[in-house]
Image (cartoon, rainbow, N blue to C red):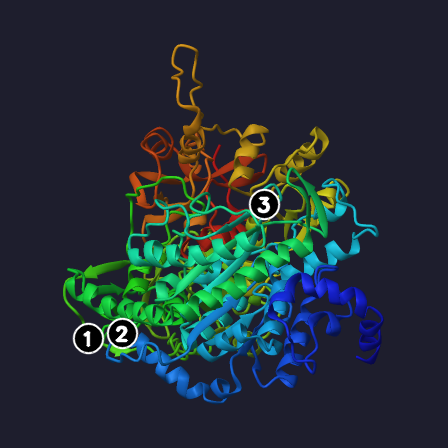
Amino acid sequence: MRKLLILAILCLNYQLSAQDYFLEKFKPFNKNIPSPEEFLGYGIGERHTRHDLIVAYLKKLSEVSARASFAEYGRTHEGRILSMLTLSTPENLSDLPNLKEKHLAFTDPAQNVSNYDEVPVFVNLAYNVHGNEPSSSEAAMLAAYTFAASESEEIRKYLSNAVIFIDPTINPDGRDRHTQWANSYQGSPLVADPQDAEHDEYWPGGRTNHYWFDLNRDWLLGINPESRGKLNWYHQWYPNVVTDFHEMGSQSTYFFEPMKANGSLDPIMPRENYIDLNNLFGDYFAKALDSIGSLYFTKEVFDGTYPGYGSSYPDLQGGLGLLFEQASSRGHKQTTPFGEITFPFTIRNQFTSSITTVRAAVENKALLRKYQQDFFKSALSRASASRIKGYSFGDAYDQNRIKAFVDKLLLHRVKVLKNNDGSYFVPARQPQYRMVQTVFETYTRYRDSVFYDASAWSLANFYNISYSAQSRELNGTPVTSLEDFVKILPTERSDYAYLIDWDDYNAPAALHYLQSKGLVLSSSFRPFTSQTNRGNKNFHYGTLLLPVKLQKKNSDEVFNLLKEVQEKFQVPVYAVKTGLNLSGVDLGSRFVRPTEPPKAAMIIGEGVRSYEAGEVWHLLDTRVHMPITKIPVRSLKGADLDKYNTLVMVSGNYSFDDKLLGKIKSWTEKGNTLITIGTASKWAVDKKLVNETLIEEKKDTLATVQRKPYADAGDNIGKESVGGIIVEAELDLTHPIAFGYQKERIPVYKNNAVWLAPSKNAYATVSKYTQSPVIDGFITDKNRDEFLRKSASLIVSPVGSGRVVMFADNPNFRGSWYGTNRLFLNALFLGNHINVPK
Ligand SMILES: [Zn+2]
């Protein structure tokens, strides 16, 4: 600390000028409160600031200023602190519980309060969801300092009229990955050449979090601790305005809302949000940026249609979410066609927008409050007017998947009722009606067909939930917690054998756990009916058999492990005393096959789609609790593949030479399983690793090509890409890859143009799209009719004694596709036992 102070004093002269670049306008400042420069020992923009220092600075402000209070709202995967600094006048802060209650009255449709101007407006300035878009967290420190220490008239007015919540870094793990990169390659003097390593971050880059997830898609999905912590915070405070600061390519200027008009018309979002509020705020940002000479644009490129962005989720909660995009200096200084773009310049724009957001919120306080109140009131009136009174769902086979789905509903504060028959009902008439619509409704018509991201997000389909719209309200008991949600009877002891349902989402985790303890389990490739300790029961394809006397452990040890596995994973286990079944195959049948534990590796690194690789890693780490070796592409040549029986290749650009290709092929031929996802499946076909084909586009000839306006090119081409839709596929339920499924038709997520032709081998096409395949989202008629309806979603193709499991679509998309995760896990756990007849 002392060292920092000395350094700060030594650099005082320089720092004052650096500070003035940002802060001149808000002078004078309270001298007892350290500026970021004084605290850090360097001027803002001179380096990239580590997240722990940002947190330490905010804590410091809360210690020395009565205007600031610090709180932690969670921890990241890597254990970094997720923090929130609350800023207002000391009077407001000490009265915060009371102000909060008054504020929340506007979000409760049952109340009729009208003191719109009386309560300070709640503003959440949130920064740096993409770790390698670093300007905003630096701006967060400047904003925190300004609100804590400025004595200017203007800032004092804002503090009286607002409670400002500063979240400096939504994605600390990604930010620090990038910070380390940018600082370690920083030259002195700075190197502005875009080809310098400082501006060319190595795979996977800092955009994503620990598991390479894009947290700016996770607000709806709530998979990662960063978003879960934030959502819990959000639903305590319901801010009126929320910022979401980003950076874009260096060859640009600055973007603020309004967004692309057409794409932003979410069918369930109030129009006033996109039209009135964004235009109103847009004028403020324009004036503020004009005053410092910055260029900007609006209404292009970005659309806020997908409700899981940091700038769109607040719109679904009666707030105003605001997206900002700054052209990145990616590094400390970079040459662009506009001249050199410096890190301080990018920080100043974000800082300017931060203060301006508070200004616009304060000056429109009553309007924002009235808007939020109307939003929640209209949720009830719209629900009342709807024919649909709610949605019923349930699943007799898989309580853990239902639990994961209900967890999402509760995370978004959606009311869920449990009926007497064990099914669930979500009433439409509730304050979160729009979230209910978001989760259950599907849309196939759009005004604009070029989407920045997905065009489908009906969450119920992600979980393969059987649900139905109801025309009357059903009664039930509200579900308030997930404790004891899954009701599994503890197994009784058996000296003969145990059976474990493969239908449950957690069954693969249970299998891995038992295998890792040295037990040998078999998988039944046929259904049967058995006499169990709980009566006669039908067991489906894939049921696990654990014969007691064949294990190296004694009966007590086996029983104890089963108790443990039930406690950990809540899977149904049955004790049986005889191998003679009532119908179907007996337990000693040759169709009940001992399973070999998967020894899995995945190729990662430059060229590999990090999101998909991260999704595999995340699934195995957090749900199956199974290690997977991540082999970098650059080490693949020298890697000993014989240590593994399963290799995963997700989408990517794989430019392997013939030698490496041969290495993978001969490894597969030995009886191993190669799992390919998305474009890796296309690669396997292109490289003739498998004897399969693709459905390919007929090329235009000179006779068929039509002239089109040059200006339409972007839209025309954009339309043809499959941005992310939910489609229906039909499974062969007797195939090991489909074990655990009870219904042939399942929703799958498609966001690529990988069109696998159904195999010429009659037993190889596990899953094919149906004839009316589109469940939710936008696809052109041409893509639907000429490609989608004709192609396969999943093929298991024989290669020597091994096989390639080819997924056209990503079964693990964004960690949220509980409905298709099982296909992938079957490939992992049962892949080596599939012998495709040739
Ligand atoms: Zn971004």
Residue at 33% across, 53% down: 275
Q: Nearer the viewer, residue 267 or 612?
A: 267
Residue at 48% across, 47% down: 810
* Three-letter code for the amino acid on which mark 3 is drawn: Arg
Is residue 810 something one can see in this rendering?
A: yes
Residue 629 placement: quadrant: bottom right
Q: Is residue 724 left or right of residue 176?
A: left
Lower position in the chain sequence, tag 3 or tag 2: 2
Q: Which residue is mark 2?
A: 417
Lower position in the chain sequence, tag 3 or tag 1: 1
* Three-letter code for the amino acid on which mark 1 is drawn: Asn
Q: Position of residue 385 (x, y in %)?
A: 15, 63
Q: Which residue is mark 3?
A: 609
Circle 3 residues within 10 Å: few <14, some 14–19, many ≥20: many
Residue 120 placement: quadrant: bottom left
Lower position in the chain sequence, tag 2 or tag 1: 2
Residue 598 placement: quadrant: bottom right
Q: Position of residue 477 (x, y in %)?
A: 26, 79
Could you give the CA–CA distance between mark 2 and mark 1, rounded to whole angstroms? 7 Å
Q: Nearer the viewer, residue 302 or 460?
A: 302
State the residue lying farthest toward the top.
Answer: 703
Contact between marks 2 and 1 (CB within 8 A): the answer is yes
Q: Position of residue 377 (x, y in %)?
A: 24, 70
Q: Which residue is mark 1?
A: 475
Q: Is residue 50 left or right of residue 591?
A: right
Residue 753, compared with residue 706, is above or below; it is below
